[in-house]
Each structure stands twice: as C-alpha cells, then as structure tokens.
Image (cartoon, coloured by chain):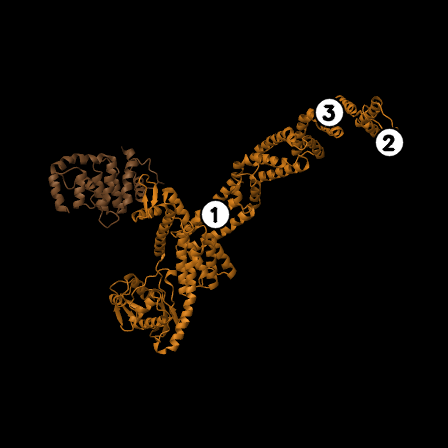
Amino acid sequence: MENKTIGLDKGWDYMQKEITKLKRILEGLPEPPFTSEEHMMLYTTIYNMCTQKPPHDYSQQLYDKYREAFEEYITSTVLPSLREKHDEFMLRELVKRWANHKVMVYQEVHAKVKDAVITLIDKEREGEQIDRALLKNVLDIFVEIGMGQMDRYEDDFEADMLQDTGAYYSRKASSWIEEDSCPDYMLKSEECLKKERDRVSHYLHSSSETKLSEKVQNELLVAYANRLLEKEHSGCRPLLRDDKVEDLSRMYRLYCKIPQGLDPVANIFKQHITAEGTALVQQAEDATSNQNSSAPGVQEQVLIRRIIELHDKYMAYVTDCFQNHTLFHKALKEAFEVFCNKTVTGNSSAELLATFCDNILKKGGSEKLSDEAIEETLEKVVKLLAYISDKDLFAEFYRKKLARRLLFDRSANDDHERSILTKLKQQCGGQFTSKMEGMVTDLTLARENQANFEDYLRSNSAAHPGIDLTVTVLTTGFWPSYKSFDLNLPAEMVKCVEVFKGFYETKTKHRKLTWIYSLGTCHINGKFDQKTIELIVSTYQAAVLLLFNASDRLSYSEIIAHLNLTHDDLLRLLHSLSCAKYKILSKEPNTKTISHGDYFEFNSKFTDKLRRIKVPLPPVDERKKVVEDVDKDRRYAIDAALVRIMKSRKVLGHQQLVSECVEQLSRMFKPDIKAIKKRMEDLITRDYLERDKENQNMFRYLA
Amino acid sequence: MILVDGITLLCNDLEVDPQDIIMLVISWHMNASTMCEYSKMEFLRGLQELSVDTVEKFRDKISYIRSELNDEKKFHDIYNFAFSWAKEKGQKSMALDTAIGMWRLLFAEKKCPLLDHWCQFLQTRHNKAISRDTWSQLLEFFNKVDTGLENYDAEGAWPYLIDEFVEYLNENGINHSKME
C-alpha cells in the first residue's frame, strides 16, 4: 500500500468509478458485486484522504462531493422511477428504494403511499389476500421517519386510515342493521373487531389498536345500539326470553368495552326480570282467586318457591353472561325489589317469607327436603329477604312463628333453627336476630330449669302437686307479647302454680313470674261411657272441661262467671269443644254456633277409635296484632332517628331531614313520608324540634 | 283576677259582644294566658300598652284595635297567640271544635274560600285535636298557597294534615281557580 499523500482529484476519480458501479448494482444492471479487495481499497483510500495532515485533509470536500453525487442520483433516477409507478408497484418500488437509500423520498410520496395502503386495507377487509409483509414494511417507513416520534405515522397515515375505517364500517353497519338479526349482527361485529386487532398485530403499529377498535365499535355498536338491542324479534328482550345465553354473553363482551355501553343492556335486563316476577305474582293471585278449594296459603308458598327459582336463574346470568358486573347485580336487585314488595292476596311478602320459613322448619312441614336442600333453601330465602323493605315486619312474623315452633315442640331440627339465625345475622346484623337467638337459648335454659324442678319435687315429695307439670320460663323481652289474663284456674292447677312458685323462689328472688295460660297445654283423661280417652287440650280448654267435674250442666253465663274469660275467648273454646270435630260437650240447642243463652253438658257418649286425641283450638289471626306491633315499633324508630339526626345537625331543611331519616331506617324498613311528618309534628309538640321562624322548611333541634 | 262575670261587665262598658273577635285582640294586647280570664298583672300591663286609663278612652280605642286585624304582621301574631289562649290548659293540642270555632272567628272577615272545606275535611277525615304546628302552618298555607293550589309543593314541609287536605281537595275535584 502506498503511503504517500493522495490528491483530491485522483482520489475522487477513483471514488466516482466505484459509485457508478454501485448505482448500476442498485438499478439492477449487470455488474459483478464488490469484492472484498475493492471494498478494502475504497475504504483505505477514503480513510487516508480524510486523515492526511492539512492542507491535504480532504474530508470536507469528499463529503460534499459524495452528497452531490447522491442527490443527483435520487433526483434524476430514484424519484422519477417512483413517480412513474403506481399502487402496489409504487409501494414495491418505495420499499426497494427505501431499503437502498433511506433518504427523503418520504416527503415526495407519503400522500400517495397512504392512499395506496388504505386501499389495500379496504381490499383485505373485503376478503382479498394482500401482501401483509409489504404493508408492514411500508408502514415501518412512517414510523422510522419520525425518528422516535409517532407524529408522522399518526398525521400522515393513521388519521386518514381511521377516518376511512369509520366510513367503511358506517356503510357496513347501515346495511347489516337492516338485514341481520341481532345475534348475527353481533357475530359480525365481533369478527370485525377481531380482524382489526389482527390487522394491527400484522402490519399496523401497535399504538393504533385502541383507536382502531374504538372507531369500529363506534360505528358498529354505539351508533346502532338502540336499534340493535331493541330489535323486535331478536334483540336483548327476545334473547333473555329465549335464554340465549351465548348471545347474551357476546352482547356483554361487545358492550363492556364501551363507556356506558352496558347501561341499556342492564336496563332491559331489569325490565325483563321485573316483568317475569310481576307475572309470577299475578299468577299466584289468579290461582288463589280461582281455586277456592286449595288450602289457604298454598299458592303463596308456591310463589316464594318460584321467586327463588327466578332468582337462581338470573343470578346465574349475572355471574356467567355478565361476568358479575356491578351494573347487572344492581339491575337484578332493583327488579326483585319491585315485585318482592308487592302484596299477594292481601298478604305482605314479609309475612309470606316468614311462613315459607316456618313450613320448612316445622315438623311435618309441607316440604320434604334433605338436610342439604333445607340449608340451601334457607340460604336463598335469606337472600330474598334483602329485597324486602319491611324487614321489621318479617322479623315480627318470624318471631311469632318461631315462638309457636319452640313452645309447642314443633321445630323439626335445632340445627336448622340456629343455622338460619346465623344467616339472618350475617345479612341483617346482630340487632335483627338478638331476640330470636334469645328465644332459642331460653328454651335450652328452660329444659335445664325443668330438670332442676323435677329434682326439687323428688326431694320435696310433700310439695308434689300430684300432676306432672312442665313449666317453660321465658325472658319477657325476647318473645312476642302475649296477653296474660287472670283466668280462674281450676284448683288442681292453682296448686301446680303455687308449687312452681315455691321452687322458683329458691332459685331467685328478683324475678317476677307472669303466667301466660293461653300458651299452655294439658293432658286430661276423659272418662267416657265406652272408654277413657286422653285429651290433649289447651289450658283454657282444660279449665272449661274441669268445671264439669263438679256440675253436670252449665249455662254459658255460669261458665264465663267461673272462668273470668272474655266473650271472644270463651266462644272459641266452647266451639272447639262442642261444635267442632270432637263433641266432648253437648250443647243445647244443638246448633253450629255458640250463643250466650246456650247450655252445656259433659257428653259421656263421646268416643273415638284413638286412645289419645288432640282437640284443636284454631289459632286467632295474629296478623293484625303483628302489624300493629310493628307500627308502634316504627314510630319509636322514626322518633329516635329524627332526634339522632337533629342532635348532630342542630338545624336542617325538611327535605334533607326526611331523606337522612329514610336512609338511616332503610336497613329495617322503608318509612313513608307521611309517617315521618307525623312523628316530626309530634316531636314539635313535645318540644324536641321547632320550625324556623323565618323559613317554614327549616327545623331546629331544641336541646 | 277578672273572670267570666267581670269580662261580661267589661264588654257591656265597651259596648262589644263578648263573642266579638275584638276580645281576642284585646286579650292579645294583655298577653292573657287563658280565654275569659285576665289576671291583674295582665290587665294593667295591657291597658298601659294601649295607653288607656278610662272606659271612654278604651271605647275610643276599639276601632283602632279592630283595624289591627288588617295588619298582616299583627294578624300573624294574634293568630298564633290564639292557639295557646284558646286551647285547654295543660293540653298540648287544641280540641277540634275549639279550633274550628277559632278559625271561623279569625277568618270571618277575610276571604278564605278553602276554610269551609278545611273544616269539613277535619270533621269527616280527622276528627282529632289540632297540634300547634298544624295550627300555625295553616295560616302559612292560606297565605302562601293560592286557592287553585298551583304553587303547593307536595314535597314541602307542610304538616301531613295539610298534605291530606290537598289530597282531599283533589279527590273531590274542589279547585277554586276553575270554579271562579
């Protein structure tokens, strides 16, 4: 290698020769490729020319000349060749040229390039095969030219591509919406969205994915949302009606990505459930009024069953089709709140639900279920309770029925009793179940107490009343209130009471025993002519019957004077003993109803094939009392809430006070505004509140 | 202490009917705690306030006192005063008959087309005593809500009895703006 200075002209001549060779290669003309020697030679020459000591450093001159030569090549050869080509060929030329040069061809051609790319995309959308690799290369140019910024890609290509996409799908949507059913339309939409995502992964820049999807969603799903979802024979409603689970899931998938997209779906879902539930209520109503023969309450119990099934069904929709989305949970809840709070044949749903529980929990209830099935049903009943606004009314009915189960030994299973209380407690809070739990506990304690009493009698045989006596001692506050009458007990029973009092005083001095005879049961032997029959009767019935040990014949007025009962009670008692299934007393005159002038006699001719019979006493309708009790409790609850709110707020507008009060009480019941106003008026009268002198809508707390 | 007999004498001297509403206004001036009764304190303070020291002066004052009923602010005070004045002592509310009597007296001179309906409504639907709040709010209701009920707000803070009255009017198709 020569180690002497190379002159500019000589060096450039040599370089020009090699540049010409390069151009021929680039243009695809026949030319042998560069050998490694040629490469080496060229490189060394240029290196030397650029590193020679001044004035022989030609680096600036060489650079200028090289650029001139290149610009000349691009303007005279490359650009014309791009200009004369079109469409795909132009793109191919571009990629080729771009790969050769990486120069500013871009400015010249990007607009044409963009149009060509968009045309190809549309062709692909129509199902044509296109060269995806080619598009990828072309679009890489837009990215590359930005040198790390995306603005060239976005401004020179993406914006127009999105606009075209919008127009394309707008055309498609307008014809599909006319021709296709809702499920087909959704299938197409889902397919299109998938293909567009595919497109992004194959040749568009990844940043386009969201924008492109949004564009397509807008045109296909948002613009026609109403028409699509409301399609008469295939829209959301028919899909729900026909249980098209798969289509509904697709609907969810499509619309969950769109802001507020699910609102109309959830709304239709709610309307649909409301309609189905309301129809169930109506059916029960109709069935009850049509078949007077069926036992009272049967249809209502069937209704609860059906409502539970309805809930199961649509809860599964919420979890499966609608991915547990809160919007659908809310829709389900609101729908159930509508028809779960309707009255059915005059019964509140709170009562129906309590009766339903009773039927499950009592011995020989209408439902024959396995333990697991009972547990499951109880779980579901408690869930339904969440939709019922009058929870306090449910609690009161439930307590009444629980009391009957516990006191008359009608509860089928202790574990189930405790288990539903646990469930209720979880859902409604400890306050809700504390009394019920107290009742269950009371009964356990009462059994221990009874054992102690029996021990006491064994060790004090003098005290034994000569009758087997079981006393259930209860805590007043836990149980429903029962009226206690000063019934004149037969002497035998008075003795019993005295003996028990004697025992109870050995245990505690501070508690007062109140006897509720109306809840008592007696087993007495009736010595009839044919045989002796054991009669299971209430304490009241027994008191009536025992009168006939001393007299053969008694008038109505004599009986009432002996026993100190109310007319209502005595009428019921005498009816059960002389006019019903078992005529233990014969009545004069022998009619179906009791009159104040009637006479009664022990019917010694009475007999029955059984040795032991239960003489039923129809229970009094407790509904009115329960409703009254609940109403009274509500008045206290509203008072307490109003005072609590005003105590902390001191001055409050009427609207706000009412709404805060409703809010506070909503866990137990839904107070009506009139009830609140009445309580407010009462609180004003009692000087807890006053109206503002200037503004009659403001209330002040008077400490 | 001036009791029923004394008041009859006073009325004779003043030449007014004891049933005249003027006796309510005089009692208001005296801040009398009970109907048909003035304590000495109440009586003297009231006369002082009216600047009256002879029967003649008192008689001359009557027409002025009557004119006070037309002053809206004073009527408001007199109206609210009437509740505690007329109600049975020791009771929180006013017996319905007393209340109706007082309303008829108070509104006799005023044009109040809903008053008859109100009294009828109370007698048929309510038939219980009237609380102070309902008493005082009724005047607000008559003042603020026009007889056609156009500006009645069902969501407002009216006592429930007034809400029910409006329902009653609507149920019975009583609407004065249309009738007039």
Q: Nearer the viewer, residue B46 or A657?
A: B46
Dot 3: element: helix
Labels 1 and 2: the sequence-earlier one: 2
User: How far is disc 2 from disc 3 in space, using C-alphas?
Assistant: 34 Å
Picture colour for chain B: brown
Q: Decide: is B45 above or below A36.
A: below
Q: Chain of mark 2?
A: A
Q: Amino acid at mark 3?
A: Leu
- Residue, disc 2: A37
**Residue neighbourhood size for the residue with mark 1, other residues' Cα within 10 Å, grouped as few (<14), some (14–19), many (≥20):** some
Q: Decide: is A435 above or below B164.
A: below
Question: From the viewer's perspective, is A284 left or right of A44?
Answer: left
Q: Amino acid at mark 1?
A: Lys
**Residue neighbourhood size for the residue with mark 2, other residues' Cα within 10 Å, grouped as few (<14), some (14–19), many (≥20):** few
Q: Chain of mark 3?
A: A
- Residue, disc 3: A82
Where residue A274 appears, as percent x and y from the top left, is 46, 46
Q: Chain of mark 1?
A: A
- Residue, disc 1: A333
Question: From the viewer's perspective, is A72 left or right of A212?
Answer: right
Residue furthest toward the right?
A: A1
Where residue A65 appears, as percent x and y from the top left, is 78, 23
Q: Decide: is A422 above or below A253.
A: below
User: How far is disc 1 from disc 2 in space, using C-alphas?
Assistant: 84 Å
Q: Nearer the viewer, mark 2 or mark 3?
A: 2
Where residue B11 appears, as percent x and y from the top left, is 13, 41
Q: Nearer the viewer, mark 1 or mark 2?
A: 2
Picture colour for chain A: orange
Residue B38 seen in this snapshot: no
Q: Nearer the viewer, residue A21 or A307?
A: A21
**Residue neighbourhood size for the residue with mark 3, other residues' Cα within 10 Å, grouped as few (<14), some (14–19), many (≥20):** some
